[in-house]
Image (spheres, rainbow, N blue to C red):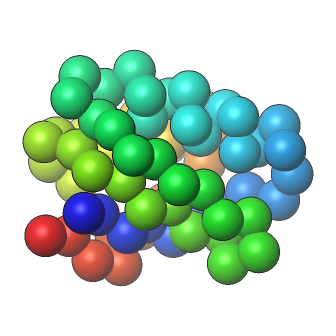
Amino acid sequence: MTLLSVPDMSCGHCKASVTQALSAIPGTAAIEVDLTTRQVHLTSPAAPETLLAALDEIGFPATVLSAK
């Protein structure tokens, strides 16, 4: 599981955009977006850099808090 911090996420539209961008990465599943903490938990075979690039591409810079 990977935990990302997405500080610019603040509304339902943001949540939908982030979920859609991450869902487009093959093999990504179990995406949980928490607007209160502005964090995303997900399972993905993709490298953390790939996840960050997908979010950066849609205007949501993120950082990896943990990756397993």
Residue 10 seen in the current view: yes
Quadrant housing the C terminus: bottom left
Residue 37 coordinates in the image, percent (x, y):
67, 78
Q: Is residue 49 left or right of residue 5?
A: left
Quadrant housing the N terminus: bottom left
Residue in view at x 71 percent, y 45 percent: 15
Would you place residue 65 above or below residue 67 in this image?
Answer: below
Q: Foreground: 1 or 7? A: 1
Residue in view at x 56 percent, y 27 percent: 20
- Figure disc tally: 0
**Which image quadrant for residue 66?**
bottom left
Q: Foreground: 4 or 49? A: 4
Residue 57 seen in the current view: no
Residue 61 coordinates in the image, percent (x, y):
54, 54
Residue in view at x 23 percent, y 22 percent: 26
**Which image quadrant for residue 10?**
bottom right
Would you place residue 27 above or below residue 6 in this image?
Answer: above
Residue in view at x 21 percent, y 29 percent: 27
**Which image quadrant for residue 29?**
top left
Residue 58 coordinates in the image, percent (x, y):
59, 32
Q: Is residue 32 left or right of residue 9?
A: left
Would you place residue 34 above or below residue 48 in this image?
Answer: below
Q: Is residue 43 left or right of residue 8?
A: left
